């Protein structure tokens, strides 16, 4: 092609009878394929989920068994028979870590599920309700949001006493407030879309509009947030356990393991009993974050475009 | 290649420019496939093509910019001799805003609503340090004068929401020109505007480009607009130049079949005699849908009246199998009327009748059968289709909801509907985002037809589509009307589209019916002065039309104001060349009847409206 065709009339070569089809809007979107950080996150999360589920079956010893009953001494260095050493009561750190994984992850996951159930139902409910109902529910939620989470948790657990169901319900209710705000905002955004109005003009009932029109469009962003929220709940549960109000001894969970073994930092032979559970919390939360980031980086533009 | 003597004047040149899209798996898809063109000083080059042709992508390359997911894959984009495609962001920063400026489609989205206009207009040169804020302020003032903005001394001290849409569009031009760039890139700057506003903006742009001695790349899909502003035209399809040359040649002697197709999609000017009068075989004794003396508005005011009245005393009758076109500028209440019919906005006064029977004003009180008979088709197919539902579910839902169909009967009907809107059967399994804009609009129509309706309300259904795609949708609507006997209410601000499709036209101005009647009568004298303004504002496919039009009396007065709702008097008073002071602004205009069913609301006698304004 020549560049000097500006003033004269240029006509591209053509075949008669070729139709010029309407050009496609955009290339169909591809499926999610994780980047290497995404794979790393998935690997680590997968590892911990495996331990959480099968830990009690594959742990070398029981939760409260002593690996060296004849050689009682706290905070022993790792050696065959106790690959991560022993803790303040000379129990096997590795076994306790494996038992604790199930409790930390299980309680947190259940609490996050509860938070999502409450938050989504109330949030989307508020979004489609009359302004008055929305206002009342939202202000109550704001009041809860203004309370510091850990303080609220402390008060509830101190009053009712600690057990696993209490922990799950407390964390679930506290974090439902955050989910409520997100679900309500998403619901309101989707409520004003033309396809929802089209459903209303068609005469669809409220249930159809929530389950078929709003929910499928809110689910994806909410699921991305689920991972993030799970991290906060893990940290919350671990903090409560660290403060002695979470999982009660002699049961192990990562937060309480850190607290039990704090003494190792000042006068133990080995600091592994403190570092190992702390590191477990860190690797799990960072890995979840990696996966969430990777998914939202992939769908970021497209998600908002679909909304 | 011969070096011509005027090559010093070349501001921008694309040389074998190639831009690729990078897919997720790393493979590349060419979007722009080797494009060459030049822009000389004082020259406007139009890039024309439908969406997906790469015209915006090419225009952005002049700023050294690629949208995310795209990359420069070869060739050069020379701005004043420098290849901007190979520059880093740091190197580009002083060039953008200084040497080249970009004007986006939407001025409303360009301006920050909470910062004074002047501050935003002068921001770039002051930030780049090329002007002091006094110099920039003086430049801005001279531009306000050149762009013929009202009250140029003080307009800069307003906020963006305090000026009209057309004024904001011109202020955006001032923003771009304040740094005295050599090249201006305009991306569809008038596409979203009403025809009357488009004229004022085009005129200002054209004048200021000439005065400033800048060069411009003008991106559009509207050939009639190109004829007014461009010196050269580059026709693009699928990232390749199909035809290029001086504007006269392209418009009068185009050769490439694609250019001819673009020309063919342009609808003739609105004139009597083209409204394809549909046959009467579907007629019945009672009209399909009727609005009697309807008032409607938004908000809650005193005595149960809306706080802001939009529609006043509107009477519209839609006969079975007929099409009623509703026309007017934005803010005239066209969509409000459609929402009243659909039951989304209950009227504050007046009555609605469906098949001769009164129906509830609020859709929540309508029976499923009544809901079925009135279907709504939205302007933006993108937002009207649930992105998470497959096409078969979107179209299938009304079939089972109203018709109670399921299983094989539903599938059979679904395939019939797809065939009716000319989509292949495999599309049933696709999601909306896998379809083009025109295809989505067809699905949108099919969903309405699936209800087996009496009346389909089409709200600006072709406005968001390219000329060719829009023309195809209109052809589809015409054949659907013949086959099904469905009545259409066709709302548009594009008079040419309405004229080619409607049997009857209702001209709305500021919520009142200015004129209504059969298409042939509305488009022939006597006209309401507003109808005359609308007709004369539709761009013609010839060069020089803009100059002829802006010198005519009705355009000059018509351009002076925007749509304002008034409680008494004729709302068009301020813009009317025939206005009678003391009467038109204080007394509601009477209904004048010309012939059987042609109504004009005006203080002037029908005879007075016959003559040329």
Image (cartoon, helix red, strand yellow):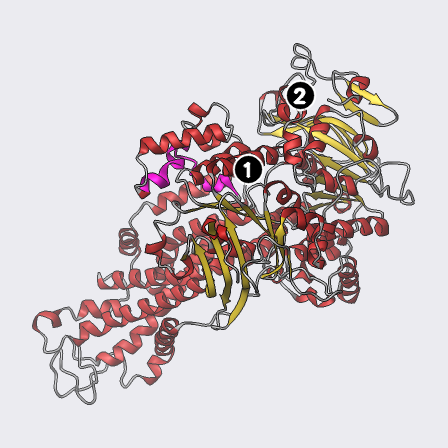
**Element type where label 1 sits in the image:** helix
The quarter of the displayed image where residue A213 is located: bottom right
| Residue numbers of the magenta segment | B106-127
Looking at the rendered structure, which numbered label has been put on residue B576?
2
In this figure, which residue is indicated by the disc labeled 1? B206
In this orientation, which residue lies closer to the viewer: B106 or B365? Answer: B106
Depth check: give the residue in front, A4 or A122: A4
Occupied quadrant, residue A95? bottom left
Query: How far across and down, in percent of the image, does residue B378 sit?
Result: 66, 46
Give yes or no for residue B117 being in the magenta stretch.
Answer: yes
Asked if residue B394 lies in the magenta stretch, the reply is no
Please identify the quarter of the rendering in which residue A116 is found. bottom left
Q: Is residue B305 visible?
A: no
Tally the numbered discs: 2
Q: Mark 1 lies on which chain?
A: B
Give coordinates of residue A250: x percent, y percent.
24, 72
CA–CA distance in space, label 1 to label 2: 26 Å
On screen, residue B484 above or below B588: below
Question: What residue appears at the point 39 percent right and 34 percent down from the top-left corner?
Answer: B115
Compared to B321, does A155 lie above or below? Answer: below
Residue A94, percent from left and from top? 24, 80
């Amino acid at each position: 092609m020549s560049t000097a065709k500006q003033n004269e009339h240029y006509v591209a070569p053509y075949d008669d009878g070729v139709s010029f089809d309407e050009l496609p809007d955009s290339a169909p979107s591809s499926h999610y394929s994780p980047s290497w950080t995404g794979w790393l996150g998935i690997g680590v999360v997968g590892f911990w989920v495996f331990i959480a589920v099968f830990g009690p079956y594959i742990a070398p010893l029981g939760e409260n068994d002593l690996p060296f009953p004849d050689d009682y001494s706290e905070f022993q260095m790792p050696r065959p028979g106790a690959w991560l050493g022993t803790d303040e009561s000379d129990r096997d750190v590795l076994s306790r870590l494996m038992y604790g994984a199930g409790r930390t992850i299980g309680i947190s996951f259940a609490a996050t599920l509860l938070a999502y159930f409450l938050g989504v139902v109330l949030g989307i409910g508020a979004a489609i309700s009359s302004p008055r109902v929305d206002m009342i529910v939202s202000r109550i939620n704001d009041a809860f949001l203004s309370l510091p989470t850990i303080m609220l948790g402390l008060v509830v657990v101190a009053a009712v006493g600690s057990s696993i169901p209490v922990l799950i319900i407390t964390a679930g209710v506290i974090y439902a407030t955050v989910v409520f705000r997100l679900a309500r905002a998403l619901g309101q955004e989707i409520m004003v879309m033309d396809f929802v109005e089209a459903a209303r003009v068609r005469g669809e009932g409220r249930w159809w509009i929530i389950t078929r029109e709003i929910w499928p469009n809110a689910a994806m962003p909410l699921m991305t947030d689920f991972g993030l929220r799970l991290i906060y709940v893990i940290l919350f549960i671990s903090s409560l356990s660290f403060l002695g109000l979470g999982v009660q001894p002699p049961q192990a969970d990562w937060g309480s393991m850190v607290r039990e073994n704090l003494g190792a930092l000042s006068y133990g032979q080995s600091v592994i009993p403190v570092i190992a559970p702390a590191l477990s919390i860190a690797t799990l939360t960072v890995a979840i974050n990696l996966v969430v980031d990777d998914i939202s980086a992939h769908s970021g533009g497209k998600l908002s475009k679909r909304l | 290649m011969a070096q011509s003597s005027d090559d010093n004047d070349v501001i921008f040149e694309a040389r074998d420019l190639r831009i690729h899209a990078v897919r997720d798996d790393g493979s590349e898809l060419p979007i722009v496939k080797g494009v060459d063109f030049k822009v000389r000083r004082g020259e406007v080059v139009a890039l024309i093509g439908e969406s997906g042709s790469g015209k915006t992508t090419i225009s952005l390359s002049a700023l050294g910019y690629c949208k995310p997911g795209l990359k420069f894959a070869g060739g050069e984009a020379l701005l004043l001799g420098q290849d901007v495609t190979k520059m880093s962001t740091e190197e580009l920063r002083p060039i953008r805003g200084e040497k080249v400026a970009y004007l986006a489609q939407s001025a409303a989205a360009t301006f920050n609503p909470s910062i004074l206009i002047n501050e935003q207009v002068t921001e770039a040169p002051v930030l780049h340090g090329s002007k002091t804020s006094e110099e920039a302020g003086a430049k801005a003032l001279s531009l306000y004068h050149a762009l013929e903005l009202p009250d140029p001394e003080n307009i800069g001290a307003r906020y963006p929401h305090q000026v009209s849409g057309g004024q904001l569009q011109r202020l955006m031009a001032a923003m771009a020109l304040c740094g005295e760039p050599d090249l201006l890139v305009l991306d569809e700057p008038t596409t979203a505007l009403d025809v009357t506003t488009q004229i004022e903006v085009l005129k200002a742009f054209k004048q200021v480009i000439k005065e400033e001695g800048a060069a411009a790349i003008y991106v559009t899909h509207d050939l009639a607009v190109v004829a007014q502003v461009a010196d050269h035209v580059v026709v693009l399809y699928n990232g390749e130049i199909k035809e290029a040359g001086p504007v006269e040649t392209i418009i009068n002697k185009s050769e490439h079949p694609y250019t001819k197709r673009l020309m063919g999609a342009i609808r003739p000017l609105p004139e009597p005699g083209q409204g394809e009068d549909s046959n009467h075989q579907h007629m019945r004794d009672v009209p399909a849908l009727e609005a009697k003396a309807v008032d409607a508005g938004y908000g809650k005011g005193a005595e149960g009246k809306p706080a802001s009245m939009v529609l006043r005393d509107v009477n519209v009758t839609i006969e079975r199998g007929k099409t009623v076109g509703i026309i007017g500028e934005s803010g005239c209440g066209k969509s409000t009327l459609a929402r009243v019919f659909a039951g989304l906005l209950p009227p504050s006064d007046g009555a609605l009748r469906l098949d001769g029977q009164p129906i509830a004003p609020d859709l929540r009180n309508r029976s499923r059968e009544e809901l079925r008979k009135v279907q709504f088709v939205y302007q933006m197919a993108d937002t009207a289709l649930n992105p998470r539902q497959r096409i078969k579910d979107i179209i299938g839902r009304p079939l089972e909801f109203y018709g109670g169909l399921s299983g094989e009967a539903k599938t059979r009907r679904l395939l019939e509907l797809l065939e009716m809107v000319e989509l292949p059967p495999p599309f049933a399994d696709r999601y909306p985002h896998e379809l083009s804009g025109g295809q989505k609009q067809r699905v949108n129509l099919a969903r309405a037809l699936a209800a087996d309706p009496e009346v389909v309300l089409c709200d600006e259904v072709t406005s968001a589509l390219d000329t060719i795609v829009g023309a195809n949708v209109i052809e589809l609507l015409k054949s659907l009307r013949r086959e099904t006997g469905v009545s259409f209410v066709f709302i548009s601000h594009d008079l040419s589209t309405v004229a080619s499709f409607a049997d009857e036209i209702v001209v709305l101005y500021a919520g009142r019916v200015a004129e209504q009647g059969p298409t042939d009568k509305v488009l022939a004298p006597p006209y309401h002065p507003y109808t005359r303004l609308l007709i004369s504002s539709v761009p013609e496919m010839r060069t020089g039309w803009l100059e002829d039009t802006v010198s005519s009396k009705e355009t000059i007065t018509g351009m002076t104001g925007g749509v304002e709702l008034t409680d008494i008097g004729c709302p068009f008073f301020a813009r009317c060349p025939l206005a009678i002071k003391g009467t038109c602004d204080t007394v509601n205009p009477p209904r004048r009847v010309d012939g059987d069913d042609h109504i004009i609301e005006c203080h002037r006698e029908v005879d007075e409206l016959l003559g040329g304004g």
